[in-house]
Amino acid sequence: MSSVLLNAAAAKAAESPLNLFPDPANCNLGQIFFLIAVYGYVLFQASNLISDGGELLLLVPPLAPIVGSVVLPVLGAVPDGMMVLFSGLGPDAQNQVSVGVGALAGSTVMLLTFPWFLAVLAGRVSLKDGQPTYQRPPGADPLTWDKLSPPGNLSLLQTGVSWGPEIAENAKIMLLTLIPYVIIQGVSFTVDTTPKIDDSRAELVAAQQAEASAENMYALFGLAICIVQFCWYMSQQWNDIETGGAISDSIAETTTQALKDGTLTLRGAMSSFRTSNCGLSKKGSVEEVLLDKESMDEVRRMCKILKPFFSNYDINGDGTIDFEEFRMIFKDVGENIAREAQAMIFDAADADKSGDINFEEFIACLVSFALDPSHDLQEVSKRRYSGSSNSCQDNSCEETGEDGEEEEDVPEDLACLDPQEQQRRIMMRSANKMALGTLLVLFFSDPMVDLLSELGKRLDVSAFYISFLLAPLASNASELVAAYNYAKKRTRKSITTSLSTLEGAAIMNNTFCLGIFLGLVYFQNLAWEFSAETISICFVQAVVALSVISRTVHRLLDACIVLSFYPICLGLVCVLENYCGMD
């Protein structure tokens, strides 16, 4: 048997010498599982590369709004979109497209169930009188009080989360983007015929062609609606940036994390602010700069970014920090300037000479630092590095304070660079990651579709179930991790950002990916034979949307119920197909 497979594989390779992927038809079951694992891992890494590359662009202030509102949502949908596209381009598109349907359904349902549950689990706090305890009550000891009490509490009824109004608004948009499903499925119900047991192959093909012809123009109409809704949703995302919504918070969060990780310095984060106000800062005072609307928008952005650093050292919660805490913040944001320069900045902000500064004074002195026209403050720092952009002088990279402590440096490849070079380097890294990730998705999506289709044939199971379970593991891992990381901060804003990410991914599936699918149905003249799958997708989205529209608090019990929709969806498809006679 193995020699037959080898001979067949050799003959196939001779016919297509440029095909680098093994033909699934010539592989045994073990080899198919192995190749699925390999291709899935590659697609998983490709998805992460695209996501990481896109998030790097959030660190470039002029690009951050368009990246956060348009580029990242589209890039997040690319892996699923390519799976759908390649499933409908082969010679057996009518049967193989079920892999794309499974990937689309599995991605949408998985995003709204499993990561949703993880986000609530990670972000849960104690409930008091049905409301989350995000704020410390008056008189509570800040050293012993915790949002989740006791720590690790897993009570289904006494722990939960709440979110901002953006979640309900996104849920309404998600329901609205189900319209193309309703259109194509409604037509399918009217023209679909149940095949008879004794129908020949030719009769089944003729029935499929008749159904495809009747549905063709409606598929085009649905595609047009998907395009309109996609463009409208992108405009809504852009407006969210302007009004400081969840996307704006996500951009600030990414920049804050980059500062903590040393990927970016404070001057790099404020480079566009300095560039846009360079002329103003030379002519007048900081007060004149802050009268400019665009400058104030940038200051508000920096407030969001720097607030976590300030709060980290404001241990007693009185809204002030002293000089030593101020110095630690400067080290945290990658600005290793001399102690005397830090003292100059602090003293200028400490107007009443109390030895402490509040958050507004803290932001004001950092604005002065960014706009320093003479570069006097930055020069102290620059002299610590060599003129080369790639290496530092080992004997001059240490700064010793009065207590003899050694200053920490940011990573070599960024610490020695001026802000403009930091931004250029970040953009290069981003472009390389996104290009490599996209190439891998394009290269491996088609063979992955072939493998999942062949596995379905070998196991005598619909390829829909195979791709429903396996495809999202490769294509949606980044959204799962992002949602969890946002939620574990346990604030109303962070859980809002987390769940908005999941709803946004579902909306992109309903517009971008479904648009690709309907395009295949129209241009490839395919019949819409996915009634059970469509009903299950719409059911899960409708239930989740209605649950968040009707309430603003989710208990851990509610999250468990949402999680149960994942297996329920599969069971619903099975019942509708096998017991209700739906295709």
Image (tube, helix red, strand yellow):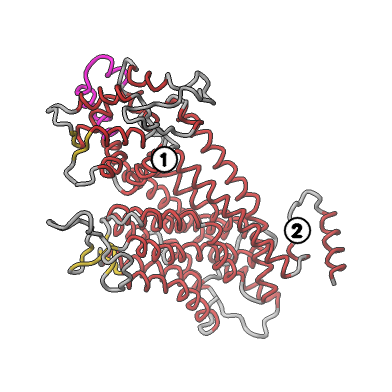
Q: Is residue 147 left or right of residue 20?
A: left
Task: Tell me if 256 is positioned left or right of 280 in this view.
Answer: right
Q: Secondary structure at mark 2?
A: loop
Q: Is residue 119 above or below residue 323?
A: below
Residue 285 is inside the magenta segment: yes
Picture layout, residue 420 above or below residue 510: above
Magenta residue check for 36? no
Q: Position of residue 66 (x, y in %)?
A: 40, 39
Mark 1 sits on what residue? 258
Q: Is residue 391 visible?
A: yes
Query: Range of the magenta residues?
Result: 278-299
- Side of 468 relative to 561 (left or right): right
The chief SS type of the magenta part is helix
Identify whether 171 is placed above or below 316. Answer: below
Q: Earlier in the sequence, mark 2 or mark 1?
A: 2
In percent of width and height, residue 216 lies at 55, 61
Q: Residue at x 75, y 66 (%)?
A: 25
Q: Secondary structure at mark 1?
A: helix
Residue 225 seen in this snapshot: no
Q: Which residue is more in the foreground, 389 or 108?
A: 389
In percent of the image, x 85 and y 63: which residue is there?
6
Mark 1 surroundings within 10 Å by alpha-carbon count, few (fewer than 14), some (14 through 19), many (20 or more): some
Residue at numbered disc 2: 22
**Residue ID at (49%, 58%):** 514
Residue 62 occupies quadrant: top left
Q: Which picture quadrant has residue 132?
A: bottom left
Residue at 21 percent across and 19 percent down: it is 285
* Pick the front one: 258 or 468: 258
Q: Name which residue type carries label 1.
A: Ala
10 Å crowding of disc 2: few (<14), some (14-19), many (20+): some
Instruction: Say which of marks 2 and 1 sits in front.
Output: 1
